[in-house]
């Protein structure tokens, strides 16, 4: 018996590579996440900025990744039953959260995400990695919502070029060139809604032309059968069920923000993930 997705939704996900929108959080819950994020930014200031030049910067650099190990409120989000029920419908009852990725575009900023397939860079060997893209603020065409190429998860891996473009939010500015934009689908989301999509699906997003920040976070879920093949070690958080395989070191649950035990795991995990993301790259510019 399915929990959140009916058989038609599951079939469409398999065929097109995505399902959207799906309401999982209330507007108040989404606002609470935004409040928590912006409270951290106000307190920590430049620690979240890649160039360390301004206070109140959006999550950038290392703090964009695996921050569920740093903040108790985000550790709670990745375990939200409404999210896990939908993921379980797609990959089964045993679920690991491999990582979390923040994507925050400031109002009227030039930041964008180029066309890419995550499966080309993450080193996670599985057919069942589900990206849950959670809108914390309005995600519209104007604010630069996620765009997808339906069905592209079934095609051979597309060729990517590292551009290191200044405003590209991806680590290497990795880009699939020559995409026919007329085939793309825009995934507009209200705060508290998610888009579910296969990590092999080609996707991108335009700059934010709106007057508000576009705040989103990607929650990446895998079954315990998955393996990391681009690094000798990796970690993940068991959020539901049982891990009978041990392919990933299980992460601790932070008891509070900046719990020392979880922070130490974060440091190890961040170093490993950077090794994965930049493997084989000739660094030509700053990472996003």
Image (tube, rainbow, N blue to C red):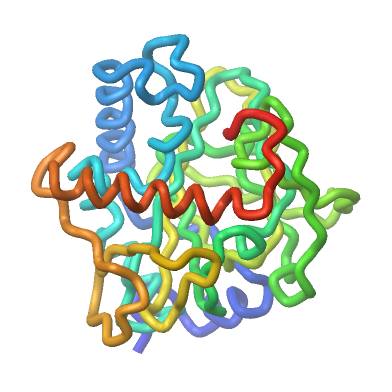
Q: Is residue 163 above or below residue 16?
A: above
Q: Is residue 110 above or below residue 131?
A: above
Seen from the viewer's position, the closer of residues 123 and 44 is 123
Seen from the viewer's position, the closer of residues 84 and 114 is 114
Tell me where residue 8 appears, x and y as whole percent: 55, 81
Seen from the viewer's position, the closer of residues 280 and 151 is 280
Instruction: Tell me, yes or no, if residue 23 can be seen here.
Output: yes
* Left or right of residue 174, residue 277 in this image: left
Seen from the viewer's position, the closer of residues 177 and 163 is 163
* Left or right of residue 210, residue 253 in this image: left
Identified at 35% across, 57% down, the residue is 24
Q: Which residue extends farthest top?
A: 54
Q: Which residue extends farthest left?
A: 255
- Quadrant for the C terminus in the image: top right
* Left or right of residue 285, residue 133 in this image: left
Tell me where residue 264 appears, x and y as whole percent: 22, 46
Identified at 78% across, 74% down, the residue is 155
């Amino acid at each position: 018996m399915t929990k959140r997705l009916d058989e038609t939704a599951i079939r469409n996900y398999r065929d097109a590579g995505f399902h959207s929108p799906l309401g999982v959080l209330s507007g108040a819950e989404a606002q609470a996440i935004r409040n928590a994020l912006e409270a951290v930014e106000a307190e920590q200031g430049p620690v979240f900025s890649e160039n360390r030049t301004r206070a109140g910067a959006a999550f950038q650099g290392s703090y964009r990744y695996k921050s569920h190990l740093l903040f108790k409120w985000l550790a709670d989000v990745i375990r939200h039953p409404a999210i896990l029920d939908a993921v379980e419908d797609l990959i089964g009852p045993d679920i690991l959260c491999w990582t979390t990725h923040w994507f925050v575009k400031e109002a009227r900023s030039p930041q964008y995400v180029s066309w890419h397939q995550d499966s080309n860079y993450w080193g996670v060997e599985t057919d069942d990695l589900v990206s849950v893209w959670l809108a914390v603020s309005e995600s519209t065409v104007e604010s630069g919502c996620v765009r997808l190429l339906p069905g592209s998860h079934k095609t051979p891996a597309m060729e990517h070029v590292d551009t290191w473009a200044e405003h590209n939010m991806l680590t290497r500015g990795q880009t699939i060139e020559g995409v026919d934009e007329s085939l793309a689908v825009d995934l507009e989301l209200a705060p508290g809604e998610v888009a579910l999509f296969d990590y092999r699906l080609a996707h991108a997003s335009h700059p934010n032309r709106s007057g508000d920040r576009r705040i989103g976070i990607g929650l990446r879920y895998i079954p315990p059968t998955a393996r990391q093949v681009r690094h000798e070690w990796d970690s993940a958080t068991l959020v539901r069920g049982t891990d009978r395989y041990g392919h990933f070191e299980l992460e601790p649950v932070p008891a509070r923000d900046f719990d020392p035990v979880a922070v130490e795991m974060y440091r190890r995990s961040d170093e490993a993930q950077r090794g994965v993301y930049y493997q084989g790259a000739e660094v030509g510019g700053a990472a996003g």
